[in-house]
């Protein structure tokens, strides 16, 4: 199909000015996009700055580095979209993608040029490559501006053979793994910002032009492959870190946070019970884990193996869930939120006070229980560096694998419950409690079960967290943490698994990236929450 | 004698809770929103008063002298201005767009605003030229007549700030009573809280009434902020969280949506807390457990008498 034929609407007087322009100059868009893309591609080979100390080294010709590579990738995307605009498959809308690339590449180049002039002292330091990139970005922007938009015809998605679809998923996951490892490995803050802009640009372009929906369609066709490859990527991630614990420590924090958020998702997302004190259950698990650990500061003499400790953590947390749940489930909505909030505060204050002078000595009060030893499964010491296939895996990598198992378990529990009679009952309660009761759903019992299961999962995560953090103190379990958990659930989408994982990752990663990158040291919040 | 002394302490604490609780209950009564950031409005009020003192009475503050008594009304005006401005902005920017959103959205927004205001004060207050850094406690200026030596009638110890706090509650309650039951706007407020749709049909500007509710709450919270500053002689950016939570407990205790319930609930909570410090025997007594008892009361009340002491209608919404 060719776009050189006349547009369908000949009478352009009734169209808006923007549409008139698209009708008139739309045929130029592929040309502009390819031209701009080639310029961006070319600029990567040229020198961007006279100064070789900023943004990596971008002063050498024919040796692209850092932001030059990002510019080239953006250029390739622009060329591909321009070519697709020419070919015009019915299931794609390259015009919208081009608009995103246009805006994104403009922002990218402007940020890069401003950074160069600021860091090197004036715009005279910008070399020819920077200006070529700016020209290319302008052309792509113009292409996005005039490119015509098409209606998507989702029925015409190409059906590839099974192996090809699986290949798409695998390649996508590999790119995801590589990009994540690369992003986390960056140490220059402005290169990091440029990379974020570039990645965002490409992501928005892919989604805007309809690739996102297609990939979703392919994923839905191969759910098992998607799940397995996602797990595999998560499993392979520590191997990309070269034995460094810096990113792995953040990754373990994210996994614990995500596991807890998934537990909260059962309570809030499925059963619709607003819980503002959920962090107390994680705290319960952590305190049980600490008190029954080998730490010399542990206040209980009993030191069972970790499997028993995990079960104890789950049992105690779910008992607390039942204790708080059984009376308070008579109230609903906002009242429940406040009661759970009050419970969360009582937990924190009680842990703070049970130090021997204000009550029985269980928690050492504000000092908490320090010096919790690392886990040891059948001689596998979590505190030591293990070398697998020549790649050293540090302490946090060991915990990362354990937490990955935990997450898999939580997801399994969540999805099996969600698909069962119980899950249907929860959703019914969430949607309309009275109607559910009238239909014979055991409302009270199911609500209690939601509280107990959610609390048990958080308690389980807590026992591991105690060992990974090596100490447990009351100030880790403040209300703000509960609010963050709730925010992760709401941000990702209540009742979903993937959404909550994404939400938890964003909420934990974003503040760290923004705070810790510019100052190379450790920020105050990072130090207090990581071990 | 212990009992009478704790009664005085409890009334002081309770008056403070009551002043803040009114803000929760008025807003909840009209739009069924738990304005989680109300504790921060209280904190902003205290900082507003502090800023006013620093701007207009700098020489006294730097010299470590007591401010003259006429500084008090000026500081009240400053505190109320700060609180009301923030509260109105908050309503306009954050809550109004979410008026018809699912129930969870405004609640989470409120938590977000609460965190935002705390961090804004913590990080930015010290950046204002010649203002002290607010990352730690900031001393609150002393004012002639309302600060100073305690009175000791009949062997009791009554701080002067106690008189100020209780007096402020009495005056505010009287003013509120007049406003709600005698003025046109106050009656419109009652109408909106009973049935917003019908009220709108009767020609009441509901949006304006909601703003008025926020303004009333913010005004009383600002006065409570000054009272707190005078009582504990310092302010800090975190003071709003626990006070707000307690005040909410008080509002629920009295029956949320009911203004008199908030006052009664505040006083009850304050007295119970003070008595718990004194009369619960063993290690679970004493001031370190008083917050636990306050929240325990909240839970007990919600479970056994969810409509609160004065029994406003219970809004059953999920």
Image: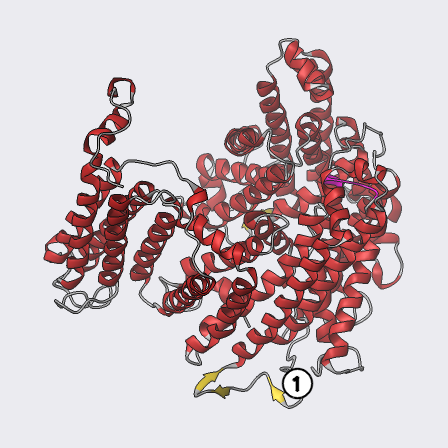
Mark 1: which secondary structure? strand
For label 1, the residue is A377
Residue B91 appears at what percent x and percent y? 55, 30
Residue closest to the eye, A198 or A382: A198
Kindly identify which chain the residue marked by label 1 belongs to.
A
Residue closest to the eye, A237 or A171: A171
Left or right of A9 in this view: A269? right
In which quadrant will I find the C terminus of chain B?
Answer: top right
Residue B260 appears at what percent x and percent y? 78, 27
Left or right of B205 in this view: A78? left
Residue B68, relative to residue A141: is it above or below?
above
- The residue segment tinted magenta is A330-335
Can residue A69 be seen in the rendering of this structure? Answer: yes
| Residue lying at the far bottom of the rendered structure | A379
Residue B219, relative to residue A322: is it above or below?
above
Residue A227 appears at what percent x and percent y? 55, 64
């Amino acid at each position: 199909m060719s776009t050189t034929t006349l547009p369908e609407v000949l009478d352009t007087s009734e169209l808006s000015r923007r549409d008139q322009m698209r009708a008139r100059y739309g045929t130029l868009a592929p040309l502009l996009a390819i031209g701009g893309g080639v310029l961006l591609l070319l600029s990567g080979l040229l020198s961007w700055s006279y100064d070789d100390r900023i943004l990596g080294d971008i002063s050498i010709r024919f040796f692209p580095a850092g932001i030059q590579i990002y510019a080239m990738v953006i250029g390739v995307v622009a060329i591909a979209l321009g070519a697709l605009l020419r070919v015009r498959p019915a299931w794609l809308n390259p015009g919208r993608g081009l608009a995103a690339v246009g805006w994104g590449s403009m922002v990218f180049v402007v940020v890069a040029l401003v950074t160069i002039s600021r860091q090197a002292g004036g715009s005279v330091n910008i070399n020819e490559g920077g200006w070529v990139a700016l020209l290319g970005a302008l052309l792509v922007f113009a292409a996005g501006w005039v490119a015509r938009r098409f209606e998507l015809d989702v029925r015409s998605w190409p059906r590839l053979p099974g192996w090809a679809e699986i290949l798409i998923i695998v390649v996508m996951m590999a790119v995801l793994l590589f990009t994540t490892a690369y992003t986390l490995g960056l140490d220059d803050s402005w290169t990091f910002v440029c990379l974020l802009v570039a990645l965002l640009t490409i992501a928005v372009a892919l989604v805007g032009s309809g690739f996102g929906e297609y990939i979703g369609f392919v994923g839905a066709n191969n759910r098992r492959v998607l799940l397995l490859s996602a797990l595999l990527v998560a499993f392979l991630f520590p191997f990309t870190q070269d034995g460094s614990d810096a990113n792995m420590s953040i990754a373990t924090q994210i996994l614990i946070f995500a596991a807890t958020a998934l537990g909260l998702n059962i309570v809030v997302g499925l059963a619709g019970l607003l819980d503002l004190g959920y962090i107390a259950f994680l705290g319960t698990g952590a305190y049980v884990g600490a008190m029954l650990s080998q730490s010399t500061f542990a206040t209980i003499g009993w030191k069972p193996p970790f499997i028993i400790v995990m079960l104890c953590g789950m049992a105690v947390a779910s008992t607390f869930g039942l204790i708080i749940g059984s009376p308070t489930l008579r109230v609903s909505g906002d009242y429940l939120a406040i009661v759970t909030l009050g419970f969360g505060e009582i937990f924190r204050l009680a842990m703070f006070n049970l130090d021997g002078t204000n009550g029985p000595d269980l928690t050492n009060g504000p000092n908490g229980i320090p010096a919790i030893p690392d886990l040891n499964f059948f001689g596998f010491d979590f505190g030591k560096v293990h070398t697998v296939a020549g790649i050293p895996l540090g302490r946090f990598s060991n915990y990362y694998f354990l937490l990955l198992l935990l997450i898999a378990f939580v997801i399994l529990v969540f999805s099996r419950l969600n698909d069962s009679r119980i899950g249907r009952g929860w959703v019914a309660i969430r949607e309309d409690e009275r109607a559910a009761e009238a239909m014979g759903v055991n409302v009270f019992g199911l609500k209690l079960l939601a509280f107990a299961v959610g609390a048990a999962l958080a308690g389980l995560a807590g026992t591991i967290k105690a060992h990974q953090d090596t100490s447990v103190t009351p100030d880790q379990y403040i209300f703000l943490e509960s609010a963050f958990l709730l925010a992760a659930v709401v941000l990702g989408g209540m009742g979903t698994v993937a959404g909550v994982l994404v939400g938890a990752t964003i909420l934990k990663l974003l503040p760290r990236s923004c705070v810790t990158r510019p100052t190379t040291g450790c920020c105050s919040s990072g130090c207090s929450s990581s071990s | 004698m212990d009992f009478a002394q704790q009664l005085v302490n409890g009334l002081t604490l309770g008056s403070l809770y009551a002043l803040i609780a009114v803000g929760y209950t008025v807003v909840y009564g009209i739009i069924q929103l738990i304005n989680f950031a109300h504790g921060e409005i209280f904190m902003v009020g205290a900082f507003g008063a502090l800023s006013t003192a620093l701007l207009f009475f700098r020489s006294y503050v730097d010299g470590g002298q007591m401010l003259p008594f006429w500084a008090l009304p000026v500081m009240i005006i400053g505190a109320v201005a700060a609180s009301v401005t923030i509260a109105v902005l908050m309503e306009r920017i954050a809550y109004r767009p979410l008026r018809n959103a699912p129930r969870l959205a405004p609640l989470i927004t409120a938590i977000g605003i609460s965190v935002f205001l705390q961090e804004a004060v913590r990080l930015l207050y010290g950046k204002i030229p010649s203002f002290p850094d607010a990352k730690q406690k900031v001393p609150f200026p002393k004012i002639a007549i309302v600060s100073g030596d305690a009175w000791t009638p009949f062997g009791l110890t009554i701080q002067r700030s106690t008189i100020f706090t209780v007096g402020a509650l009495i005056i505010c309650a009287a003013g509120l009573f007049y406003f709600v039951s005698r003025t046109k706007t106050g009656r419109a407020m009652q109408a909106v809280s009973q049935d917003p749709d019908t009220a709108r049909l009767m020609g009441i500007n509901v949006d304006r009434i909601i703003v008025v509710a926020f303004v009333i709450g913010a005004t009383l919270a600002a006065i409570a902020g000054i009272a707190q500053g005078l009582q504990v002689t310092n302010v800090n950016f975190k003071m709003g969280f626990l006070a707000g939570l307690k005040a909410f407990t008080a509002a629920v205790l009295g029956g949320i949506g009911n203004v008199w319930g908030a006052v009664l609930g505040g006083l009850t909570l304050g007295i119970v807390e003070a008595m718990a410090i004194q009369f619960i025997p063993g290690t679970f007594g004493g001031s370190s457990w008083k917050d636990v008892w306050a929240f325990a009361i909240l839970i007990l009340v919600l479970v056994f008498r969810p409509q609160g002491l004065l029994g406003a209608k219970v809004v059953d919404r999920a």
